[in-house]
Image (tube, helix red, strand yellow):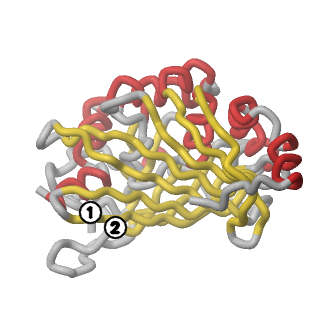
């Protein structure tokens, strides 16, 4: 029963489902000698990006802001999140703010999300879930592996996608939030990412490889001089369940404040909602 409830939650609780329901980069290099030296210093882009997730683990933790954009039915909607992530223990906490409804009324309370290996926990889910309870969703049971489901891409899983980089180019130097960074642009493959991902993310990325309209994920990523991701924008092709047509979803993750303490404690089993999730009702 619990597994059925988790899967039902995965189908009906998703923030991207809310977005669907509402509707039915960077400086380049010059030809100067300095620019040429910078390109040489950047190393092999593909190899550099394959290491990006490991570099985050070495960084320990950071603050994070996320945004997820989708254009559907002539309406562009954006879901925003803010919080922190502990890369060594694979735990994160985000406060996710849903967009206004078409009438312009906010209507939805922010959702608290806890990100953990193999699971997504949501509080303030609404739709009949008690206010003091969490909803738990198994990420491997989601057709997108939770890359877009929660309205925010797990920062470490986003980095794991880069392990599937097949082609990439160094674009040049720029800044993100006042920090000097190197900008890379390329395409990752979800099947390849699943093959080389850590054990915690392998099943989720394999599910995404099967569930998305295409396994290709175009991206732009900005690394600081320590090789840490400062900004990552990925473009997923998500299948609209109502219209059976691919929908472009752009997920952007900003990382900063490395080393910051992260308050992410998983709920006790007694605090997890075990009842039925109401169908087709937005949180709030």
From this view, report whether residue 237 is shown above or below residue 121. above
Which residue is more in the foreground, 159 or 118?
159
Q: Mark 2 highlights which residue? A: 98
Where is residue 188? Give x, y as percent. 54, 32
Crowd around label 2: few <14 · some 14–19 · many ≥20 (10 Å): many
From this view, report whether residue 216 is shown above or below residue 273. above
Position of residue 129 in the picture relative to residue 102 (left or right): right
Residue, x 30% and y 49% (percent of image)?
Answer: 14
Where is residue 282? Give x, y as percent. 22, 61
Residue 24's image quarter? Answer: bottom left
Where is residue 191? Give x, y as percent. 48, 21
Residue 271 can be seen, yes or no: no
Residue, x 22% and y 46% (percent of image)?
Answer: 12
Residue 139's image quarter? Answer: top left
Q: Mark 1 highlights which residue? A: 283
Label 1: which secondary element: loop
Question: Which of marks 2 and 1 precedes in the sequence?
Answer: 2
Residue 199's image quarter? Answer: top right
From this view, report whether residue 202 is shown above or below residue 278. above
The quarter in which the N terminus is drawn is top left
Mark 1 or 2, which is nearer the eye?
A: 2
| Residue most extreme to the top | 195
Tag 1 and tag 2, C-beta contact below 8 Å: yes
Crowd around label 1: few <14 · some 14–19 · many ≥20 (10 Å): many
């Amino acid at each position: 029963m619990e597994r059925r409830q988790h899967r039902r939650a995965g189908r009906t609780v998703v923030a991207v489902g809310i977005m669907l329901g509402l509707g039915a980069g960077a400086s380049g290099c010059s030809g100067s000698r300095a620019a040429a030296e910078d390109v040489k210093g950047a190393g092999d882009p593909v190899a550099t990006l394959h290491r990006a997730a490991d570099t985050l683990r070495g960084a320990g933790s950071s603050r994070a802001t996320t945004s997820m954009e989708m254009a559907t039915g002539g309406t562009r909607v954006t879901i925003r999140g803010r919080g922190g992530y502990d890369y060594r223990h694979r735990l994160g906490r985000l406060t996710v703010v849903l967009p206004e409804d078409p009438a312009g009324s906010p209507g939805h309370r922010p959702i608290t999300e806890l990100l953990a290996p193999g699971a997504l926990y949501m509080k303030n889910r609404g739709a009949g879930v008690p206010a003091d309870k969490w909803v738990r969703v198994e990420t491997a049971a989601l057709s997108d592996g939770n890359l877009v489901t929660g309205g925010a891409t797990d920062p470490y899983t986003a980095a794991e996608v880069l392990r599937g980089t097949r082609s990439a180019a160094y674009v040049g130097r720029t800044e993100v939030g006042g920090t000097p960074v190197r900008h890379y642009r390329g395409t990752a493959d979800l099947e390849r990412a699943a093959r080389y991902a850590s054990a915690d993310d392998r099943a989720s990325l394999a599910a995404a490889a099967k569930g998305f309209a295409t396994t290709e994920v175009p991206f732009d990523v900005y690394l600081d001089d320590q090789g840490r991701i400062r900004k990552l924008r990925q473009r997923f092709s998500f299948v609209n369940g109502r219209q059976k047509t691919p929908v472009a979803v752009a997920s952007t993750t900003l990382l900063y404040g490395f080393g910051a303490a992260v308050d992410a404690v998983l709920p006790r089993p007694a605090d997890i909602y075990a009842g039925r999730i109401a169908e087709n009702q937005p949180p709030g």
